[in-house]
Amino acid sequence: MMPNRIVNNAEFTIENIRRDFPILLQEINGYPFTYLDSAASSQKPLCVIEKMSDAMQNYYSNIHRGLYQFSQKMTTEYEQARMKVAPFLGAGVADEIIFTRNATESINLVAATWGRANINEGDEILLTELEHHSNIVPWHMLAKETGAVLKYVPLLAGVENGLDIEAFSNLITSKTKLVCMSHMSNVTGEILPVKEITKQAHAVGAKILVDGSQAAVHLDVNVSDIDCDFYVITGHKLYAPTGIGALYGKKELLDNMPPYQGGGEMIETVSIHEITYKEAPAKFEAGTPAFIEAIGLGTALDYIQGLDNNIIREHENSLTEQAFEELQKLDGVQVFGRDVAEKSSIVSFTIDGVHPHDAATVLDQMGIAVRAGQHCAAPFMDARGVPSTLRASFAMYNTEQDLESLILGLKKVQKLFS
Amino acid sequence: MTVEELLENFALFDDWEDRYQYLIELGRKLPTMPDNYKTEENKVKGCISQVWIVIKPISNKNKEYFDFLADSDSHIVKGLIAVLRVMYAGKTIDQIALYNIDEVFESLGLHQHLSVNRRNGFYSMVEKLQNSIKIHENA
């Protein structure tokens, strides 16, 4: 087996990083593959692919119950993955990390357990117009069930602007029981001041859930510093496989939450008349979990932490800035969120007279993968009065060459549809 | 234009750019759909682009012809609609039965629009068209 290759800081260059992502070396229609859709899902480094393959080829067995060596090794690696997620997010103890399928399931878990136990008729749940549907729909369902009221922090008028941060202080009231907000918008890359909003929420006795699906990839997250009650991430955007995500919850909250799904592994004792449950995190992980994927996530975190974070952040931010600049130079291109205070790695835009779907189809002919649509954020589109946008998003492996290809591609799009 | 002519025209292009240029031109020549046809009822449920379609069989000299009007806010989808019109509009059910839509789109190099994203408006429109044709076949 090839050793897992992790570039060390001495040889840290984006070109070296790209070599860890073999998919990027392909050509499509004779053009180099230009992957600008990492906000939807990132590519996987070879070490993650090899680790999962190794685990399945060489010591596969179910976790937690086997008394033989392979099961014990697998169990250890699964629990080690949890111990890697905890410090990655700045959590105090690994028991505060629950493995889920993805951020969506993490949010649904909180809505179904903490939400049902704590949200009552007339209580307010505060969301924002920037949220991904995953951070809207579970709350909508909970509100329907309980008679709670959903409120939204609005976007400021003007496509160049972002969320109306000042509006939080008016909308967080004694009626607010929960604030649910993104740490970083999946549409515009806007980074929201979650630490400040957490203070405001706690001041009225409300809890706060932060959606870190994008932020965990591009920012240094520290849930202890933010002091949020819940923080959700997904593995597949974080250079890890699909099917694995995590929920961070403060221990005292998790301990008092009823279980989510019922099944094996989450129970302590089962008799015909009475069942007792294990403590968190096991209480929330019914059935055989996606342990191969969890181990893949652990390897992805090792990979990320083996790189120089500052260099990656600087590289991603520089690409984002250049993208904003270059896109704005094109006639008839409207970029969203130009003036927001802090943003990273994601750029949404429209082209006059060209349907985003058409632009994406033509870019695809040139091997350029971008996203066109609502990005699961219909309230954002409604607020901006557009049916959909194009979105280019960057990850650590993207280069200025990728950006150049995009700009050239967009010029061709404009020519074709002129 | 016949389906054969359409296939011949597309065969002339060596690269995707010319093929798409031609497709977009075909879309621009589509008969205009009056705005009052663009209702919620005529809208095809789709995720990305908006598509409207009105299907109307015409009876002429005891023979039933199939016809439809469609429009979209996407230029490429309009081009695809133009291709569908070549295949279906003004044709009898027997004439329509001569062509397999998957094969035609494959030959045109446009197959991805039928198969890749089945949630898009264009695919739903093709389904709606084909369902309507089936109803006529069985009538």
Image (spheres, coloured by chain):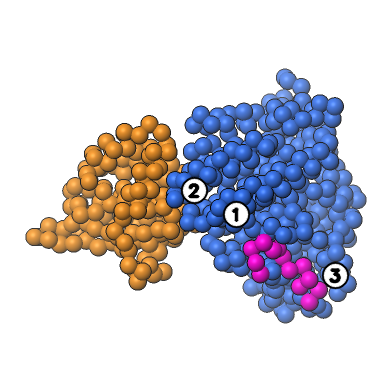
Chain colours: A blue, B orange
Residue B93 falls left or right of residue A136: left
Residue A108 in the image, given as x and y percentages of width and height: 69, 59
Secondary-structure class at tag 1: strand
Label 3 sits on residue: A200
- The crowd level at tag 1 (other Cα within 10 Å; few <14, some 14-19, many 20+) is many
Q: Quadrant of residue B7?
A: top left
Disc number lying in front (3 or 1)? 1
Q: Is residue A200 above or below residue B27?
A: below
Q: How many marks?
A: 3
Label 1 sits on residue: A349
Which of the pair A95/A225 is nearer the observer? A225
Q: Is residue A110 above or below residue A73?
A: below
Q: Quadrant of residue A404?
A: top right
- The crowd level at tag 3 (other Cα within 10 Å; few <14, some 14-19, many 20+) is some
Separation of residues labelled 3 and 1 (CA atoms) = 32 Å
Residue A110 in the image, given as x and y percentages of width and height: 74, 61
Cβ–Cβ below 8 Å for labels 2 and 1?
Answer: no
Residue A330 in the image, given as x and y percentages of width and height: 58, 50
Q: Quadrant of residue A239?
A: top right
Answer whether residue A167 is magenta in the image.
yes
Magenta stretch: dominant secondary structure:
loop
Residue A25 in the image, given as x and y percentages of width and height: 62, 28
Looking at the rendered structure, whether the residues under marks 3 and 1 are on a common chain is answered as yes
Q: Chain of mark 1?
A: A
Label 2 sits on residue: A414
Separation of residues labelled 2 and 1 (CA atoms) = 14 Å
Who's the residue at 72% across and 65% down the image? A163
Looking at the rendered structure, whether the residues under marks 2 and 1 are on a common chain is answered as yes
